[in-house]
Image (cartoon, rainbow, N blue to C red):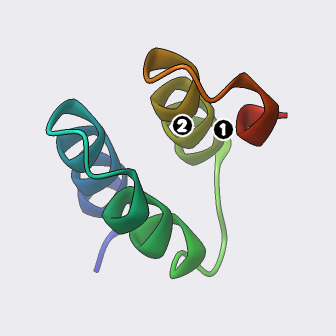
Amino acid sequence: LKIQIQNAFINMYAQCGSLEEARWVFDGIEKKNLVSWNAMMGSYVQHGYVEEAI
């Protein structure tokens, strides 16, 4: 998949509260970009998992 679609999936799963699925998509991205990192970190912070975001 294109990285833009993978990043969108991370955001979608996070908005639904499915952080495990968001992390699964994130881990599957071969070459993560800034948007990927921000999406995953923001997902954790949004749901109160600040330690995981770091």
| Residue drawn at point x = 65 percent, y = 61 percent | 32
| Residue drawn at point x = 24 percent, y = 39 percent | 17
User: Does residue 43 appear to the left or right of 5 in the view shown?
Assistant: right
User: Does residue 33 appear to the left or right of 35 in the view shown?
Assistant: right
Local secondary structure at mark 1: helix
Q: How many marks?
A: 2
Residue 54: x and y, percent?
85, 34
At label 2, which amino acid type do we have?
Answer: Val
Q: Which residue is mark 2?
A: 35
| Residue drawn at point x = 30 percent, y = 39 percent | 14
Residue 22: x and y, percent?
38, 58
Q: Which residue is mark 1?
A: 34
- 10 Å crowding of disc 2: few (<14), some (14-19), many (20+): few
Which picture quadrant has residue 52? top right
At label 1, which amino acid type do we have?
Answer: Leu
In front: 7, or 21? 21
Residue 7: x and y, percent?
36, 50
User: What is the quadrant of the N terminus in the image?
Assistant: bottom left
Q: Is residue 52 above or below residue 7?
A: above
